[in-house]
Image (cartoon, rainbow, N blue to C red):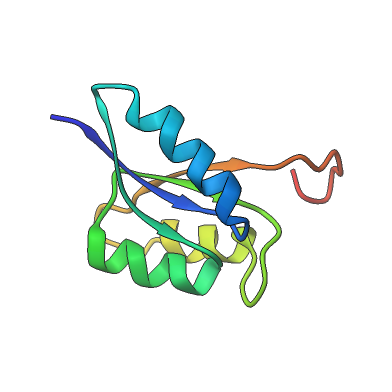
Amino acid sequence: MAIRVLLVDDQPLLRTGFRMILEAEQDLAVVGEAGDGLQALDQVRALQPDVVLMDIRMPRMDGVEATRQITGPERDGPAKVLVLTTFDLDEYV
């Protein structure tokens, strides 16, 4: 059974690139995409992914807050979140 992945990044080109890389692996399946944290929350509820590949800086709701809500204690079987960023600032890490 493939690991179900949700891609979250505000740049469509990056999402497309990640999708191409991930879908080349037999044990990974990209089940959806979101362009910001609010969309990510909706997609997590609807799609129940195993893993969320999350950007940090996005409009409307950033990846830090979206991750807090996705992995919060009130969630049943929360998805695992892998945060990706090109920023080298300790405050984001």
Q: Position of residue 58 (x, y in %)?
A: 67, 64
Q: Position of residue 43 (x, y in %)?
A: 34, 65
Q: Position of residue 31 (x, y in %)?
A: 28, 49
| Quarter of the figure with the N terminus | top left
On screen, residue 68 versus residue 89, left or right, reads left
Quadrant of the image occupied by residue 26: top left
On screen, residue 70 versus residue 50, left or right, reads right
- 43 lies above or below 92: below
Most distant residue in the right direction: 89
Q: Nearer the viewer, residue 71 or 10?
A: 10
Q: Position of residue 46 (x, y in %)?
A: 24, 67
Q: Residue at x 62, y 56 (%)?
A: 11
- Tally of numbered tags: 0
Q: Residue at x 42, y 39 (%)?
A: 19
On screen, residue 84 versus residue 18, left or right, reads right
- 60 lies above or below 17: below
Q: Residue at x 67, y 72 (%)?
A: 59
- 4 lies above or below 9: above
| Quarter of the figure with the C terminus | top right
